[in-house]
Image (cartoon, grey):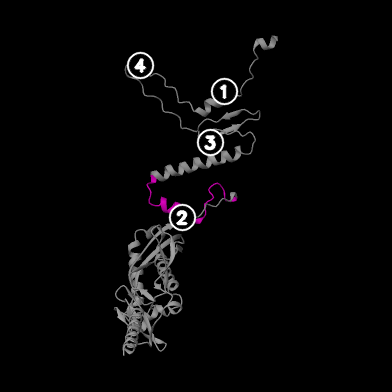
Amino acid sequence: MLEIAAVVLAVLVGLLLIFLVYRAARTYDAGAHATFITTKGGDFYGALRAPITIWDPRIKVLRDRNAPALSIITTDASGGHFEKSLVNRRTGEISLRVHTVAPRPFVTRTSDKRQLIIKAKVAFQLDIDRIIIPTQMESFGSALAARVENLFDNAIGEHEDQDVFAKQREIETSVLRQLQDIEFPADPNHATGMQLGIKVYEAMFSYEPAVKPINKDLSNGPMAYDNEHLDDLVDMLEKANPATVEVLMRMLEMQTRQNIVQMLCNSGGLVAFTASELGLSERTVERASNGANIMKAAANPPAEAPAAAPNGASASPVAAPVDPATAYYSLGAPKAQKKPEAETKS
């Protein structure tokens, strides 16, 4: 009798252990933070919405190699990009938290053909009511990143580069509205794109001009600017003060003269420049046949006669200002210096 009781007790304990193990293995902590995809007979059965123990052995949870592949490109605290999985493949848990997809920086063109480097971010959440859509996609993350990149590219391409900063918020709102309209179209019969089964909450971007080196081809002359850099100058100068533009043009002219002088001096030969060639005098210089420079007189109108001084006193003559270049060339060619007497006697 005791042996029978012992066998029955062992069987009950075994059944209890099997029950506890089965219950632990088939209990899933689903809720607002995560869900699990279940199938029955190979077909989609539903997504778990609350903690539950699945007693029906025909209902299976997709996990391990059968778990859906949901991953996105996002950024860490330092701004580096990495691939983040939304699914714990070991347990089959799918995250329902709000995530941020951040495609890698891409280059877009504005309406005036300027290149900008765009860094976009979109905050979204998987919609449990349409969870079947992303779980059945082969590359959910690539499709979402491509859509974000395409919408920002189109929205930014409608503006000129100098207007992107002023209309940044308007561009972000437009992209957000388009993403939401695709997921929840006002007219389901005329959807603007394929739904991805997500809820979109925010769209934002930052940008910086694409760094393009100035053309270094010497055949383009000293200004060697391409169309894009010339457009930069136009944008900078079109609203500037005329006096400021005049000063800048003068500085560019002097810089160009300096570039020419440096280029000629690098030839290794002896190079001579006149004051007018360097922009230091407005008078022209002619070279005589014997090599001496002759300064032409300035073509100034004759000065008016000074007014008569009161009480018959004669006005004191005032010397006309001397042009520095004229004074220099009036010195003539330098003369040879005589050697000291001590050297001649020796």
Of pointers 2 and 3, the one earlier in the residue sequence:
2
Residue assigned mark 3: 278
Across and down, in percent, residue 85 comes to 41, 70
Quarter holding residue 18: bottom left
- Looking at the rendered structure, the secondary structure element under dot 1 is loop
- Looking at this view, is 195 or 177 the one in front? 195
Between disc 3 and disc 1, the foreground one is 3
- Looking at the rendered structure, the secondary structure element under dot 2 is helix
Question: Distance from label 3 to label 1 (Cα)?
Answer: 19 Å
- Residue 331: mark: 1
Q: How many marks?
A: 4
- Which residues lie in the magenta part? 219-242
- Looking at the rendered structure, the secondary structure element under dot 3 is loop
- Residue 313: mark: 4
Q: Residues within 10 Å of mark 4 (few under 14, many from 20)?
A: few
Of pointers 4 and 1, the one earlier in the residue sequence:
4
Say if the magenta span includes residue 324: no
Residue assigned mark 2: 231
